[in-house]
Image: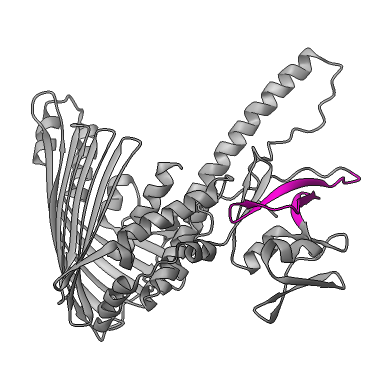
Amino acid sequence: MKFSKKLCAISLSAVMSLSVCIPVFAADETPEYETAKIQVNGVMAKDPAVLADGATYVKAENIKSLFGVECSVKDGKATLTVDGKQVALDSAVVDENLISIRTVADTLDLMLGWDDAEKTAIVIDVNNVAKENDVTFDLLKKYMDYSKSMGDTFKTTGEFKGSVEVADETAPLTIAYDGTVDSLASKKGEEATMKLNMDLSKVKTMLQSEEMDESEKAVMDTIFKAIESSETKYIYDMEKGIFYMNSSMFSAFGVDPAAWISLDLNAFMNMSGAGSFDMNAILDLAETGDIEGYILEVLKSIPVDSVNSYKEIDESYKAVAAMLSDKAFKQDGDKYTSTYALNEDGTELTYVTTLGSEGDKVNSISIVMKMSADGVKMDMTVSTDKDFNSSMSFTMDIADFMKLYMEFKSTYEASAKEPALTLPEGAVVISLNDMMNNLATDVVVTETAVEATEVSKNAAEEPTVEITEIETPVENTEVA
């Protein structure tokens, strides 16, 4: 199992307790159907998939053996019977009995991927992972229930301090900082303001020894002025799944300080290769205290790209269970402690969770995490007491080149005021998603242009060969 995927699941579970591609083949004038293997929950199925007209299908008569639900076809439309209820599929039936595997997977809320080396469509039901492991998370659910006792709308007041130290030939270059955070959150979203102060005196001293002309000095002065003392505002609209940020530091990077940068988190995660990421679903499950559902929804963000994917997701679930399930905790008086340790591929990790209780209530939590890998060491401690006072300390040493340190303390209290989730009237919004999409498009166009140049050059050397069209590779197109 790739350790990075397990570590991803572990990291996501830590936050809690506080790419799918199938090839599309160019159709001939008279399409010939090819077949591919199907793996369901780690087991190879005897019934094959059908590759037709640039999409992947399964035969209607094989739906029950593959997915465990009845399927009927009438007038070119397919209907599934799920838990006694009939569900019509969106896509039309092809050649009387071929049904899009993507449509079936989406309807049944299944993960779908493709292993190109094995020519295998991969279907995973994360609920089956939970069923096979058979663990409970009642202690953590009790803490989540207690944390909801504050109410749906609450105010956070916090302060922080820290430093960044970079090794230098003579003496370390240190930048110290401190600041405050004030936020207001509800089920609909959150608004926050962070004020940050940075001590750049050592950076200025270092730059004074460098030869700079007047224009360069003016640029540096502008940058220092923007970042030495700054104010940054954040808005997260949960219903839209969009994060907005405005900062006085924007001017240091040539951005209008009155502008807002937006990031659609779902689109960003899906673009990054996550299998099926729904931020709203994840947050809704966390709010309702559905820990099992939350964990499974998070696991859906792991890309499914190999016949080993089911095993990897299963092992990730086992890792989360070893950290946070009821079986993981040992009781000592009013404390429940879970200790998870991992030593794999040169990475050492320990993760200790302690839950405090009074009677039947679980009303406090603390987490201590230590990790070392490839010259990087990290220590983090996070805790929240029964009065919702929280603290966090964090240190990281990166190959003896850079050291990071941060402390954060905050208090929470119920609030009758709702967060303001609308941008100022007339605000200019810069979409970070669009910028990344444009960058990706530019890269594809550039690479295609290079391929075209090389083909044209070869064609010129061999005039008997006629080049009529240049096609880009299709291995990474999305399943239809």
Q: Position of residue 96 (x, y in %)?
A: 88, 63
In the image, residue 217 lies at what x, y percent? 19, 35
Is residue 173 something that shows in the picture?
yes
The image shows a total of numbered marks equal to 0
* Between 436 and 251, the one nearer to me in the picture: 436
The residue lying toward the viewer, choosing from 152 and 9, is 9
Residue 259 visible in the picture: no
Q: Nearer the viewer, residue 8 or 44?
A: 44
Counting from the top left corner in percent of width and height, residue 9 is at 39, 54
Residue at the far bottom in the pictured view: 416
Where is the C terminus found, in terms of image quarters? bottom right
- How are the residues colored? one colour
In the rendered image, the residue lying farthest to the right is: 30
Q: Is residue 350 above or below residue 77?
A: above
Residue at 42% across, 74% down = 284
* In the displayed structure image, the side of residue 177 where residue 338 appears, left or right: right
Q: Please say if 400 is above or below 458.
A: below
Pick the front one: 334 or 217 = 334
Residue at 29 percent of width and 33 percent of height:
374
Q: Is residue 54 magenta?
A: yes
Residue 193 as seen in the image, left or right of residue 168: right
Q: Position of residue 466 (x, y in %)?
A: 85, 24
Q: Which residues are magenta?
A: 29-57
| Side (left or right) of 476 relative to 466 | left
Which residue is located at x 19 percent, y 27 percent?
212
The residue under the point 87% across, 46% down is 31
Asked if residue 150 is among those painted magenta in the image, a careful observer would answer no
